[in-house]
Amino acid sequence: MTATSRDDSPVAWTRIEVLPPFRPGSSGPGGYPGVVCEPAAPFEHALDAAQTYECTLPDVVPNGTWLVSATAGTEYVANYAGGADTSFEVTGGFDDHDAPELVSAVVSPNPVVIGQPFALTVRASDEHHTTPVPGSPAATIVLPAAPGASGTWSCTPVTPELVEPTVLEWRFTDCVVPAGSSPWTYAGRLAVADAYGSSAGLSIMFSAVAPPA
């Protein structure tokens, strides 16, 4: 990149950011994980400055038009900067922009009995599942919340199994709504990401009743 000062204040710094056509797992702005850009040589302050960056991309990145945003600033005036953009095309990467989707969430027994173990089986579908790792759902609050209840419940983490080419299955066998909790509808969310970083929170809901007197 090259930068020219419009007055007698030398160009003091340069910066580039390489932006993908989309960011898996996020709709917000920002760079792509694993992209590394380093200056090829130390930068020299000058009225007409030049800086070469060498950038590397991860082995697996999304296809499409990538944006390179270049910025340069002067020495004497803080926050006085200019910028320009260019782009390049990536092929040979991936086109899967979709996060895993919930197929089913089944509890047994149904309804759940407060204070007693219950089983929860969750299935999620995706074209490119990541390597299975242990996980468990996190309890979330249902509004309106149960009187005097926090919505807390838990399951011991388990490692899911690939039961079909595109379906992962978690079989939790020792979940529990703590004794003393109110009979209510409880909810949770299981965080899942695919091999390309697209992530989703799979929502789980079930009813819980008081134990027999």
Image (spheres, grey):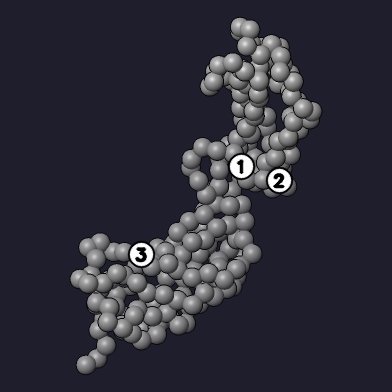
Spatial distance from mark 3 to mark 1, Cα to Cα? Answer: 30 Å
Say whether marks 3 and 1 touch (CB < 8 Å): no
Residue 102 makes an appearance in the image: no
Few, some or many C-alpha atoms within 10 Å of disc 1 (few <14, some 14-19, many ≥20)?
A: some
Name the residue beneath numbered marker 2: 58
Residue pictured at 63% horizontal, 7% vertical: 8
User: Which residue lies at the image location 51% right of the left edge and 58% below the top edge?
Assistant: 100
Left or right: 39 in relation to 8: right
Please rate how many residues cluster around mark 3, counting C-alpha atoms within 10 Å: few if below 14, some from 14 to 19, many from 20. some
Asked which secondary structure carries label 1, the reply is loop
* Residue topped by disc 1: 32
The x, y position of residue 83, in whole percent, is 59, 20
Q: Would you place residue 90 above or below residue 203 in this image?
A: above
**Residue at the top extreme, as displayed:** 7
Q: In which quarter of the image is residue 118?
A: bottom left
Instruction: Please tell me whether mark 3 sits on a helix, a strand or a loop.
Output: strand
Q: Residue furthest front?
A: 76
Distance from the alpha carbon under mark 2 to that under mark 3: 35 Å
Residue 123 drawn at (x, y percent): 49, 68
Please state the horizontal and vertical placement of residue 63, each as a whole percent of the image. Answer: 64, 40
Precedes in sequence: disc 3 or disc 1: 1
The three-letter code of the residue at mark 3 reads Thr
Q: Mark 3 points at which residue?
A: 140
Viewer-nearest residue: 144 or 160: 144
Of residues 72 and 134, the one nearer the viewer is 72
Residue sitting at 79 percent across and 30 percent down? 40
Contact flag, marks 2 and 1 (Cβ < 8 Å): yes
Q: Is residue 193 above or below residue 148?
A: above
Closer to the N terminus: mark 2 or mark 3? Answer: 2
Instruction: Tell me the kind of residue under disc 2.
Output: Pro
Which residue is drawn at the image coordinates 66% and 13% (left, top)? 10
